[in-house]
Image (cartoon, coloured by chain):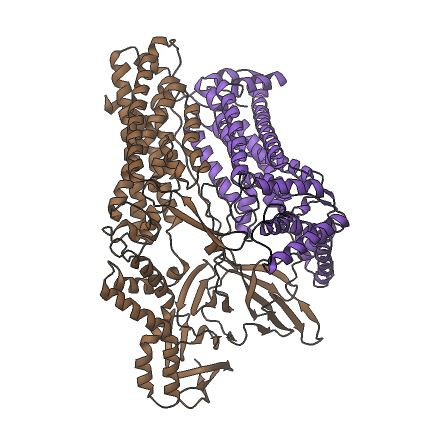
Amino acid sequence: MLRLVYYEIRKNYLRSYVLAAILLFLVLNACMIYRGYVSGDGLMGYFMPHTRDTKVEWDFYHRMHRQLDGPLTADKARYVSDEYERLSALTADGTYNEQGQTDTYTGHIWNDYVMITKYFYEPMKYAASYEKEIEQVVVKAKDNVSFYQNYNNSYEQAKNKYIQDHYSGRKIPVFYDGKPWELLFNYRFSDLLILLLMLLGLVPIYAHEKETKMDDLMMSSRRGKGNMGLAKVLSAFIYIACLLLMFSGVNLATFAALYRLSGAGMPVYAIEAYQYTPVSLSVGGFYILLILLKMIGLAVAGLGLCLLSALFQRVIYPYLLGVLLFISGLYASGYLASVEAGYMVWALVSPFSLLKGHELLIDLLGVNIGYTFVLRLTVCVILQLIISIVLYGVIRLFSTSSRFSRSTGFAVKEGA
Amino acid sequence: MLYPEWHKLLIKQKGLLILGLMILIKIALTLQQGYDSSLIINRNPEGYAAYMNQYEGKLTAEKEQRLQAEYYAVVHAGAELDELARQWKDGEITQEAYESSSKQYYERMKNSAVFNVIYNQYYYAKEAPEERYLMDERGWSTLLGHSKPDFVLLLSLIIVLTPLFCHEYESGMDALLLSSSRGKYRTGAAKLVIGAMLAMIVTMIFTFIEYLCLDGMIGLPHGSFPLQSLEFFANSEYPVTLKQAFLALLLIRIVGAVLFAGCIACVGILSKRSIITLFTCSVLIFLPYILFPEKSLLYYLPLPSGLLAGTGYLWGTVYESAYSDQGTVEKFVKFQAIGRGVFLLLMIGYIVEIALLYLYSLKKYSRYMLRSRLRYKKQTKLPLPLSLLIIGFLILTGCDSRGKVEDVFSFDAGELRNYGETAEYAIQLDEEQSLITARHLATGEEILLTREPFRQEGMISTIFVRDDWCYYVTQTLGKEGIRIYGIDLKNFHQKLIYNSLRENTEDFFGLVSEQQDMEQISRNISPVYSLILNPNYIYYVVDAELVQIQRSTGREKVIARDVRAGLALAYYNGAIYYIDHQYRLNVYKELDGKVHPLESIYTDQFHIKNGELQYRSLLDDKRLQSYDLP
């Protein structure tokens, strides 16, 4: 079987044009990250552009982070708070001297104030007050559990019990900049490139056999009928997994090199946008979870492509339908946080929702199933596993089923 | 020579079938996407059209005077109406005089929002009256103001044109064709010509579909007006009319289509495999849109992407505003205009590129035979007919209606927008904190109804209590639309009743992102004033508009634009009673779907009790009077 899988990989994916496309896309992906790094995220965003004009600010940012990163101590908090107070007082009444500001971090007091507030004071304040804030949420949830229990509202009771169980005891004992991690979690361009490479690699997987009439030959042997189908699907999984690992690796390496990712061990809720996330993993662990979810989503999308490939004799049709499938699936996944049940079901059925694991986990998103609270992510994963089993069965059926010659009316292949 | 190639491409390769399907998809998508508009115009299209009929066209001194006079009248209509009402109440004028004089002010107040839109357009036109005409911009702005790729067109071209050469190679026909001089050169030339012609025709069809759909939906009038009449083209340096701009757009797209057909042919000849051609052409055409969304660089690339979007060549420099760290508003260039000279050079460059590409393709195709190995491949069977496509929508949400037309209950939305009572609870909304509390009438126990442990999304603007349910409206700053939730007071279960907020967050990797600028983010949404629900309909008042939502379809309809907010509004037995700007009592009846003014009742306060409408009559020295309701 392993040999068959190897031959399938060699036949379908270890081709010069596929390898060239992968290499080109890996470089393009790194360039895109670099472009974002240089241009920043807009005037109202968090990341300044990396230009000669902002060099002083970035130097100050890195210097301060070297000094402050690590366990969050009272000394560090006092230092940042004092600096904030000092600069705040200076800028509030505008008494500082506009000319010849020598005793500054960045060459200008207002700039110092903005930098300290935006990059250090506010994030540190968030980290320090998180324990108290989330405790209030847990207290409310605890109160809700007993309240809804009195009124036999099982769903709300279960939801609040979930909050009570999963949000208790949270605190942020460290201080690192979580924004680059957030940027990494939100980065989606590599997903597009993987989807394009999946079209390139998976669309011909069955169609090519039919074009070259190899399918007749394969179906004539016992191994061809049984093991070959499994080998093709396994090879598709391996191809997708390799693509995902390569691109995720490049993403991580490029972000780490450019943005100096630090604090991989800090809890994911240390990133302000993820303060209400239902998972308590470290940011490193969270990134691995996102990759695993993407793997499931891409594998189901890949099986969809394999099915289309098995249905048609020429690559054009599975390609066209594959692109339309991707577009409709992506569109449906846009509803994953919908408050409307109908749209939400569409999103959960779409495998592309799992490419947006960060959106599924940024807040507590649940589903009411028989008055019990279930995470949308869990429902989505279960649905995708069911869909993948069904797809595999249908692929086997179509790739090995009997067909009849138009001219003779006799079966040209044996049934499975 | 051409006919067999046409036949092969369109009939044998199912090109015609695919194009037919794609055209249907294109029509459906164009109709579904709608057109650029604003909430104000959408809520009062008749008022906007009426004003536009008066003022559209070139701005003249006479028109300007009329606009200024109208502006003055609209701004002061409220005060004038109040003054007239005072005069009438004080007995200085008769009721007839009040009615006849107040009508004009009343109408102006109803249409003040749309007039402000027109007035903003006037301000824009005033800066350069020779080249900026007043007009309904919506249709033309949609047609010319976007640079999004026509995804269906591009996919159609890729799918239909790929087999042009690839199929010959994959079926082994290339060996046969290239063995003769006709097959070598003339067939190659014929294929290239057919590819280019087909691309041109398909592009024209798709562009005209856009034009016709928009013309049908919103209309594309005044094609002879200057391009700069559209505010988006304020900085455009082309002295052309809208129709000329559309023709220019069509020509640019045709050039792009010919270039793209050349690219597909060239890649097909070089790769000889469909999958590589499909993949490479998809990457070549789509990636530039994602890499340079709405950037001028897209239009300088030697690729067909910019040409097939087309519109950017006509744009002026586009600016965007944002808040800086200092809290000041800063303007920056979002799209740098392409100068006329540069545009001309680019076009010449593209034409040269097309000529070279086609020549190279022909050369490569015809030469191939010299080095080609003869391959014997059986021609694959034609694929089975395509079976396509199910598009399903699951839209219907909310409670089911039972076809009940009249609904016997009374509700005073004016008094009860923050308060309601059931048999067990007295419910109160704290608008400041967005909190709803219920006090148990028997025990006095206070229960918080908004119990979300995390931060609550949006602000609660009003509540409505009925049949042991508390309904409330939430609105989110910067987002159009409302959500209505209901809380069952038996078990405090919360249910979504209605949602009109846009929920889909997918931006297709930045391809269709609609970034909100500072103005849109900070847009202040008027709060919903009153809310009323029955099994069939939802009613709410926003600004001076009474909006009806059909619960089974979710369709919104403005049924009145003259509701005097802050005064009483009541629902009784399938009808809504409200006071208009003239202090006249009106009734909207669900049965006939029309508003009827109750001519004899002028009031500033009323309520309904036991089937009787009690009101303070402005005609009778504010004495309390009653009116028996049907």
- The quarter of the picture where residue B423 lies is bottom right
Please state which of residues A226 and B148 is positioned toward the viewer in this rendering.
Answer: B148
Residue at image x 38%, y 59%? B42
Q: Is residue A274 left or right of residue A143?
A: left
Residue B418, position in %: x, y?
Answer: 57, 72
Name, please, the residue furthest toward the front: A100
Q: Quadrant of the N terminus of chain B?
A: top left
Residue at image x 32%, y 77%? B103
Q: Is residue A57 left or right of residue A312?
A: right
Residue A383 seen in the figure: no
Residue B16 seen in the figure: yes
Residue A294, position in %: x, y?
Answer: 59, 36
Tell me: residue B579, above or below residue A358.
below
Residue B217, position in %: x, y?
Answer: 32, 52
Tell me: residue A58, above or below residue B131.
above
Q: Is residue B346 left or right of residue B60?
A: right
In the figure, the shade used to draw chain B is brown
In the figure, the shade used to draw chain A is purple
